Image (spheres, helix red, strand yellow):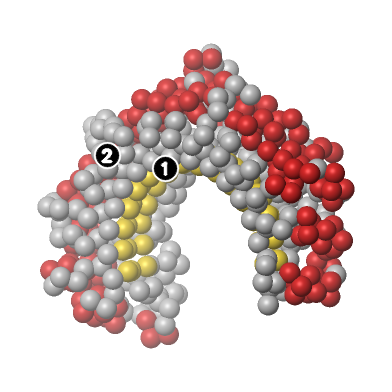
Amino acid sequence: MVWGTSTTTSAWGPQPAPLDPLLSQIRSGRTRTLVLFSSQRVRADDWPRLFDALADAERSGHGVTSISMSGQTVPVDAYSALETYLSVASSLTELACLPRDATDAELGPWARGFSSLSISALAKLDLSGKALGTEPTESKSQLATLLEAVEASLTSLSLAGTAPMLPASLAPPTGALTNLHTLDLSDCDLSPSALRAWIAAVGSLALRTLRLSGNPGLFPTDSSSSDEEELGSVLATYAPNLTSLTLSETPIPTGTALASVLAACPHLKTLDVSGAVADVLEFSPVEVREALTSLTLTGAGFTSVNAGAVMVAFPNLSHLDLSECRAGGASVAVVAAILGHGGSLRSLALRGVSLVGIVAAAAAEGAWERAGVTSLDLTATGLDLAELTALVTLLPTVTLWEVGANPCCDDVDGMMELTRTTAPRCEIVWRMMGQGDEGQEDE
């Protein structure tokens, strides 16, 4: 239940309505998902009553399974009731909490409450966007205490956007999070040593998904070659079974550093290095990786030779995102090279890449006839209606075309006719959402 969405239980404004209707629904088991938006207001004397109701529901066998209250500040007077509830919260599987300016100390009641819980079911914990990135005031951080209390059940943890940075001192001991398979440390200003501490905390082969977007310090540009390979060393030691890795906006300085990361993760299926790889030439030291099926290279520099090399290095790619890639005047040749090599490729995103003149290249490149792509994102690529119509004919395997923000969209009658004549073989989405009309698709 999202409290505050009806006029009878308004939660906005300086004088919010009492929680009585919500508390009644919680106790009766009619509310299993509780969402309190940061814009909603809870009266100070209602916080203890809320946690009392949650505890009563647990004892009655129909406890709330998901609580989202990021942005809400629990008053100190309600800490006792909060801890009591958490000590019996065996139904709670998902939790997002704390205000944006919360420090490690404010995790105290949450850590104490979960530490008193005999069997935790908490699988997903979201503490993203908080001010946890300060040295703990005690020898052991409240965050570490909380994580150890729920380690048997915790499978997903997000600390993305921790400010001012996420230090190693907040991490739980090595091997404390044995069941964690998803860890989000994006935008945490991580140093290599802090990353090592957090990855080591998992201490098992369980970790499958790791998000490290926006951490420029992971590859110091003024360090030695061995330092550049620090991330590869950490992953090889503590996370060799990763299947998904996100390094977007985390600049990778050399091809050797990138090769080290890929060598450390032989089972990697999904890699996002958007905004992290300046030039696709950095893939040149990479050995063939047959496991990789999805690659995001938004913003990278390309030539047709480099594009072909990527397809050779990752022969089983089924999804490739080259949106906003810089290919100069060679973008048409790049696409031709990709489609010519990509027999396994099914989804290709070229949003923002100029494809003016692509029809002539397509007609001259016989390999396109063997392309098996089924989904093409050609948003903002400069296509007019004649070029799009020719491409639809040249690539009969494509069943989903995204072509918004192109000159072809100005010819409404022509686009309507094209979508009509190609249905039901393919779907054409041709007008960007939020720009006047809704997406136009096959009838």
Classify 10 Å Cα crowding around label 1: few (below 14), some (14-19), many (20 and above): many
Q: Are marks 1 and 2 in contact (CB under 8 Å)?
A: no
Q: Quadrant of the N terminus?
A: bottom left
* Direction from residue 404 to residue 98 in the image, left or right: left
The residue lying at 42 percent from left, 70 percent from top is 40
Q: Is residue 298 above or below residue 76?
A: above
Q: Quadrant of the C terminus?
A: bottom right
Most foreground residue, 338 or 23: 338
User: Which residue is tagged 2?
Assistant: 177
Most foreground residue, 362 or 379: 362
SS label for mark 2: loop
Q: Position of residue 438 (x, y in %)?
A: 68, 73
The residue lying at 69 percent from left, 33 percent from top is 308
User: Which residue is tagged 1?
Assistant: 209
Q: Position of residue 233 (x, y in %)?
A: 42, 22
SS label for mark 1: strand
Amino acid found under the numbered disc labelled 2: Leu
